[in-house]
């Protein structure tokens, strides 16, 4: 592994844990966040605060217009964020989001001559999103090494997913061991302007259950 890494930093519980893992490994971290047309910007504010706390080398916020295509409760005001669990892939799935995010991270990595990208996807306590599966990560890593000048010249990109096989409770326990303060993080799909969580969306339910099962006090600010 190189001494530098790009961290996809959403401002949520998982991404701050991934950043802490990368820092614990002694990596110089470059954080990448996205203003992609989501319902609120509280998570971007949280990401900026986290990036400052962890003294990343650079924090870049890329503006994307995924709300232009809609198709998700997170990017289309006409689609309501559900307050009960759904069967199958929920309406909070944002079409191709992780593919797009990783593609931007890959481009920046090539510019910075970085070969390691960290993302906080999780295949255990997650909401059924297809782009959080190990199969997707493996396929994207193959794409990264086929689609780039660096890959064609024999360099190797690695997509790191240190949380992919952990429960939400185990993620929280890992973060606490690494000294993570979860208070400034925002996971809620319907957070208000102050970043206060709704308690009822999928993200809030998984987060609350994770703190409960981990035995760690929940520092989340609720509406």
Image (cartoon, rainbow, N blue to C red):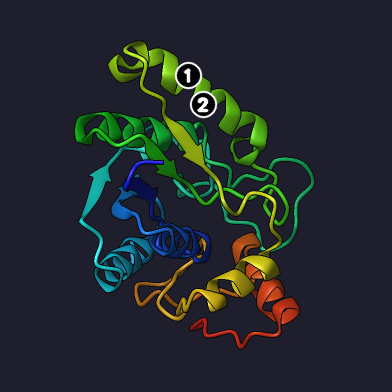
Residue 35 visible from this viewpoint: no
Circles 1 and 2: CB atoms closer than 8 Å: yes
Vertical side of 111 occupied by 13: above or below? below
Tell me the residue at 60%/54% (across/down). 163
**Relative to 19, 197 lies left or right:** right
> Looking at the image, which residue sits at the far bottom?
217
Residue 183 visible from this viewpoint: yes
- Distance from label 1 to label 2 (Cα)? 5 Å
x and y, in percent, of residue 80 in the image? 57, 53
x and y, in percent, of residue 160 in the image? 51, 43
**Relative to 95, 7 lies left or right:** left
Quarter of the image for the N terminus: give it.
Answer: top left
| Residue tagged 2 | 140
SS label for mark 2: helix
Tell me the residue at 75%/57% (across/down). 85
Tell me the residue at 28%/64% (across/down). 51
Vertical side of 11 occupied by 213: above or below? below
Neighbor class of circle 2 (other Cα within 10 Å; few <14, some 14-19, many 20+) is many
Vertical side of 32 occupied by 168: above or below? below
Q: Nearer the viewer, residue 37 or 27?
A: 27
x and y, in percent, of residue 222 in the image? 52, 82
x and y, in percent, of residue 31 in the image? 30, 53
Q: Nearer the viewer, residue 57 or 91?
A: 57
| Residue tagged 1 | 143
Vertical side of 199 occupied by 12: above or below? above
């Amino acid at each position: 592994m190189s001494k530098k890494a790009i961290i996809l930093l959403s401002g949520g519980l998982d991404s701050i844990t991934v950043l802490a893992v990368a820092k614990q490994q002694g990596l110089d971290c470059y954080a990448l966040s996205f203003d992609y047309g989501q319902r609120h910007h509280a998570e971007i504010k949280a990401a900026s605060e986290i990036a400052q706390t962890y003294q990343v080398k650079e924090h870049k916020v890329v503006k994307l217009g995924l709300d232009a295509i809609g198709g998700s409760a997170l990017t289309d005001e006409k689609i309501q964020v559900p307050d009960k669990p759904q069967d199958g892939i929920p309406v909070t799935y944002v079409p191709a989001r992780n593919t797009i995010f990783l593609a931007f991270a890959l481009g920046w990595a090539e510019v910075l001559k970085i070969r390691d990208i960290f993302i906080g996807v999780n295949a255990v306590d997650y909401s059924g999103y297809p782009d959080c599966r190990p199969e997707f990560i493996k396929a994207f890593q193959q794409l990264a090494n086929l689609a780039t000048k660096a890959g064609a010249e024999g360099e190797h990109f690695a997509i790191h997913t240190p949380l992919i096989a952990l429960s939400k409770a185990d993620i929280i326990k890992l973060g606490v061991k690494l000294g993570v303060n979860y208070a400034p993080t925002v996971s809620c799909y319907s957070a208000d302007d102050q970043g206060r969580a709704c308690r009822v969306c999928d993200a809030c339910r998984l987060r609350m259950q994770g703190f409960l099962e981990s035995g760690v006090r929940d520092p989340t600010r609720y509406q």
